[in-house]
């Protein structure tokens, strides 16, 4: 219920911001795309994580606010999905886990858009702030799978060090992207994202664990500026 209220509130804010921006002459855009996401960081023994990338998506609105010739401030409000997949063997059994987390995300980018040919070159970078609103983890052991909902919180208690359905809701990091925008308003861009926040919850029964998951991804998106 709380997740549905948060998503509804976010989209109402998006619509309200779009209406105001149009009155102020600010360019409003729609953007969506496919990302390839994974987790970087350390496991409980302080070794580098070994996760595979998984396809995810993002969808939302952006606003281009002029601040200087060819420079813009571009805030956005997106619904994004992130995650990763791991495979391992334990006592002769094939084991895997795939994580799928959903976020409401606020990117705040500085955009450079000079004229280039029949359109604009795009180069942007800046921080993002995201809040988890849902998700699940799918476990598979010898081709038998089970799904569990992601539980958001800063701490949890479990005697199983592999119990990793507990995540912090808050995520933040940086974005870098470049692309091309046609005079018609259609654009294509390549995106990279580096998470700086530890997103896995702390296990209070294993206070010495070094485990730290951080979202990381690359992707391709398309947009349209009105």
Image: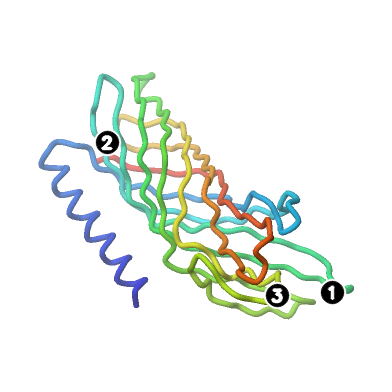
Query: Mark 3 highlights which residue?
Result: 160
Query: How far is mark 3 from mark 2, CA to CA?
Result: 48 Å
Viewer-nearest of discs 1 and 3: 3
Residue 225, above or below 4 = above
- Quarter of the image for residue 3 reads bottom left
Q: Secondary structure at mark 1?
A: strand
Query: How far is mark 2 from mark 1, CA to CA?
Result: 52 Å
What's the residue at 37%, 36% (across, down)? 109
Q: Which percent across, then down, holds residue 131?
A: 41, 58
Q: Upstream in the sequence, badge 1 or badge 3?
A: 1
Q: Is 206 in front, or is 46?
A: 206
What's the residue at 79%, 64% (across, down)? 88
Q: Which percent across, then down, holds residue 139?
A: 67, 73
Residue 70, above or below 8 = above
Question: Quick check: marks 2 and 1 in contact, CB under 8 Å?
Answer: no
Query: How far is mark 1 from mark 3, CA to CA?
Result: 17 Å
Query: Mark 1 highlights which residue?
Result: 93
Could you tell whether 18 is left or right of 140 in the image?
left
- Quarter of the image for residue 65 reads top left
Q: Label 1 crowding class (10 Å Cα cut-off): few <14, some 14-19, many 20+?
A: few
Q: Upstream in the sequence, badge 2 or badge 1?
A: 2
Q: Which percent across, then down, holds residue 45?
A: 76, 56
Query: Mark 2 highlights which residue?
Result: 64
Q: Label 2 crowding class (10 Å Cα cut-off): few <14, some 14-19, many 20+?
A: many
Viewer-nearest of discs 2 and 1: 1
């Amino acid at each position: 219920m709380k997740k549905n209220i948060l998503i509804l509130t976010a989209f109402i804010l998006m619509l309200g911001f779009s209406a105001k921006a149009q009155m102020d002459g600010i360019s409003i855009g729609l953007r969506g795309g496919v990302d390839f996401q994974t987790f970087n960081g350390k496991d409980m023994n302080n070794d580098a994580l070994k996760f595979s990338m998984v396809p995810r998506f993002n969808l939302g609105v952006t606003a281009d606010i002029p601040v200087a010739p060819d420079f813009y401030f571009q805030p956005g409000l997106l619904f994004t999905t992130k995650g990763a997949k791991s495979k391992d063997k334990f006592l002769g059994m094939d084991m895997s886990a795939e994580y799928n987390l959903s976020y409401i995300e606020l990117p705040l980018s500085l955009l450079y858009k000079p004229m280039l040919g029949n359109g604009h070159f795009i180069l942007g970078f800046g921080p993002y702030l995201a809040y988890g609103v849902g998700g699940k983890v799918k476990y598979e052991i010898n081709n038998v799978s089970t799904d569990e909902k992601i539980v958001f919180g800063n701490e949890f208690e479990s005697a199983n060090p592999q119990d990793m359905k507990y995540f912090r809701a808050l995520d933040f990091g940086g974005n870098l992207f470049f692309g091309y925008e046609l005079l018609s308003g259609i654009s294509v861009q390549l995106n990279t994202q580096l998470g700086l926040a530890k997103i896995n919850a702390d296990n209070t029964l294993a206070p010495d664990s070094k485990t730290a998951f951080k979202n990381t991804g690359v992707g391709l998106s398309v947009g349209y500026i009105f």
